[in-house]
Amino acid sequence: MLTAVVPEAQAASGAAYTWRNVVTGGGGGFVPGIVFNQKEKDLIYARTDIGGAYRWNAATSSWIPLSDTTGWVDWNKNGVDALATDPVEPNRLYMATGTYTNDWDTNGQIMRSTDKGDTWQVTPLPFKVGGNMPGRSMGERLVIDPNKNNILFFGARSGNGLWKSTDYGATWSKVTSFPNPGTYVQDPTNSYGNDIVGLAWITFDPRTGTAGSATQTLYVGVADKENNVFRSTDGGATWTAVPGQPVGYLPHHGELSSNGNLYISYSDGVGPYDGAKGDVWKFNTATGVWTNISPVPSSSSDNYYGYGGLAVDAQNPNTVMVATLNSWWPDAIIFRSLDGGATWSRIWDWDGYPSRKLRYTQDISGAPWLTMGIEPIPPTPSPKLGWMIGDLEIDPFNSNRMMYGTGATVYGTNNLTDWDVGGTVKISVMAKGIEETAVMELISPPAGAPLISALGDISGFRHDDLTTPPSKTMSVPAWSTTYGIDYAELNPGFMVRVGMADYASDTNARSVGLSHDGGANWYKASAEPTGTKGGGMVAVGADGTSIVWSTSDVGVYYSKSGGNGWTASAGIPAGAKIASDRVNPNKFYAYSAGKFYVSTNGGATFTQTAAAGLPSSGAASLKSVPGREGDVWFAGGNENPGPYGLWHSTDSGTNFTKLANVQEADGIGFGKAAPGQSYMALYVIAKIDGVRGFFRSDDAGASWVRVNDNQHQYARVTTITGDPRVYGRVYVGTNGRGIVYGEPVGSEPPPPVNQSTISPTSASFDKKTDKQADIAVTMTLNGNTLSSIKNGAATLVAGTDYTVSGSTVTLLKRYLASQPLGTTSLTFNFSAGSSPVLAITVTDSTSAGTGSLKVQMYNGSTAASLNGISPRFKLFNTGTSPVALSTVKIRYYYTVDGEKAQNFFCDWSQVGSSNVTGTFVKLATPKPDADYYLEIGFTSGAGTLGAGQSIDVQVRFAKSDWSNYTQTGDYSFAPTGATYSDWRKAPGYISGSLQWGLEP
């Protein structure tokens, strides 16, 4: 039922806040355009497809965001389809903005600035602009007359043709004489790609005008495979197709050199993802001669890509560079010519497959996660030079500086001309300050890292330090977008995230991942709901014993086995929004189409409550308050049909109260309570007193303060949460401006954290009486102190469960012996920084093999993902009699991570590699950490192993297509050590009888 409405509270005041980005260092999104000013040195701009524009700060070698004033309603200003910086008055800057040209966006606008983008004026356009549409790295579509800078031209999409302004962009009129608005449509069957791409670029010939007089000759490239280059010689009054122009491909960029050559890069698609054929052409504007100067012409079988990014050195007009669009394998290629395209050199060459000879080094220290968790497999490197290189620029003032945008970051160099003398070009990340990720979800647990992010395209991060780029993405299990993430409130080291795995490349992939160490390391669940493609959202029970997954496609499922098995939840509609109670491990909540549901048995069954008055459609953010069972908040709805706002329940959703002082709300989160308050601070994405923004309440919603201002709006943000450990700190996820966080003015920015570490981070404990042993853990404190050790919500007792001596913690065997079989995760909490986790595998070898064999082992490579697994064994005869090796077997258990034929290799053994055999066996019943084992055996030619003797057996195995294994969660994998040690997870047998170790 809908209960009484809360009385109108006081108007929302403002609280002074400082806003910063959570640093990734690399951007994390596509940068389709980089524009250098031709008059002022170091005046450089970057435009993004959904994250606005940036200006280069030469003093800090970083980028300054220019679009943060974009608000909730005018969100499409963050899609920048074209940008122009004035070559006469450098303070003037223009952008054509609008994100989509299909039906989910409104018309675009020309934005103009006279202070380099610090402030803006806006001229609405009578059509849409597509900053995030196909062909967005073509350009530039918006240009300024280099001789008479009150004149601008803009090439539109959707068949809207060419437009002109003569008053510095304040007003615009259509150039009706322009003959071809474009015909190319990327995909007529798709609502996203079925629009006309339109005009691609405009280039002035500045030699055909004088200062103060309009330039007479212009060239326009059009997305059309037949008539695609047009010229005007009367300032844009009349136009003709340039005679002799190439046909069959689409012009991406047109760059005019100072000696009169127009260079054009062509591809068979508009990008940024496609491109399988293309050419590069040079048009001599004096003679009218066209020359195909392609580094690899489309007629060649070696051409499997188009050409995109194109640059001409302003100081050396015969120096031309072009990038592939797209050479996905093995990597992008950048070409360079010093003679106007007559000859070319490549940034890398083949050097006997799979080896490559590189003319570059690549430094990703500014964003070390750019490897994406992928190990290099020659010839494919990691990290890559890039992909989607739709724009590449040479600094007009400095021939040594080049920048280019990719699908994930901006790369560049400051020693480009070393290429020409046989030197090595130093490529590095040049994206500091650009934060372009699309944020799906954020969690800030009460222990461990302050923030974990679920992101589009790059999966997400564990952010141990808000001011330092993360070292790695959440790449195991692998998928591009993490759609949902949650943690166990009472056991915050346990986390679950869901994505959409690539089942085409890995039939055993999983779209659900689990972590027992606060997101530092992840492994895939051993099972998932039948038929799902993943996605959706996930909720984790308060103690982690239950997981509920609302998939994107097959309904709602629950697991009470750590993801080992899933059962359909009853009584809940498919696609429901879900959340867990943060106190009661068995209680979960759900919302769908205006109805509210509750489960009291770990998600097995849901029952609709009596709650009424909730919105039936629109936004929906459902969360429950830590420490208060049954305390639930719901933000959501829409203007039409309504309602829209913020609701609160204190009885597990039986009744909800709508807050009258919140007009609209789209997200809710909680943070540490204000001093003197017992109720957590509330944070909302909302409209209060007619103002859109981010708001905080310290009194359970009775009153609100706005914590952002009009300079920090970040368009249409996606999610919000407070920090449970820092009062006033709030994290906001944006759709293209990364993660921002605010703190009350006067709060110092978080200093670089001195992280404490522990070693080891994984260990094993055998409950067999004569095998029990204390576990010593060495702490590297880095100025911090140990606060506590926790096992879930339980705090270990010093002196009883563990002892501390200096920097060593000793976990006592009497405590460890009381733990259940499986993984016990102990969280080490320090006075500052993150909370590392020790994962202890608890076994009981009472029933293990104790015969006359012993196996020692280590892994030749401990990389998380690799194309071959290489266990190294030492086999001992611990008995008193010789053993015929032909009767001996050793097993190595693992997950295949994609059903393929597999190959076995023995690299070395004292008994001869030819006498060592390997057989792959698929388990009839897969285990969480193994679905196959490699059984190593010996031929009769191996002879016998005498009593007290040992042999080495160094083997490796790989899939026939050399695709990757993910070995970190495998049963037999030894994550630490590079020397032999006893390893009971590699069982040994004589004549089929277990002599050593434990099977999984």
Image (cartoon, rainbow, N blue to C red):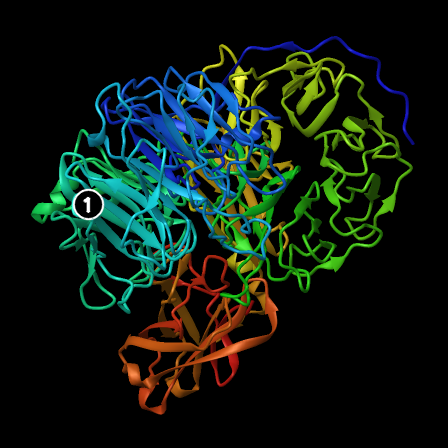
The residue positioned farthest toward the bottom in the image shown:
940
Residue 83 position in % (x across, y down):
39, 31
Q: Which is nearer the eye, 170 or 603?
A: 170
Across and down, in percent, residue 84 comes to: 36, 28
239 w.r.t. 572: above or below: above
Q: Which residue is mark 1?
A: 320
Image coords of residue 35 (percent x, y): 32, 32
* Residue density around tag 1, few if under 14, some if 14–19, many if 20 or more, within 10 Å: many
Q: Secondary structure at mark 1?
A: strand
Give how far across and how far down residue 236 sits, in percent: 35, 33
Q: Quadrant of the N terminus?
A: top right
Label 1 is placed on what type of residue? Val
Q: Residue at x 26, y 78 (%)?
A: 910
Q: Nearer the viewer, residue 954 or 575?
A: 575
- Residue at 50% x, 48% y is 196
Q: Nearer the viewer, residue 614 or 904?
A: 614
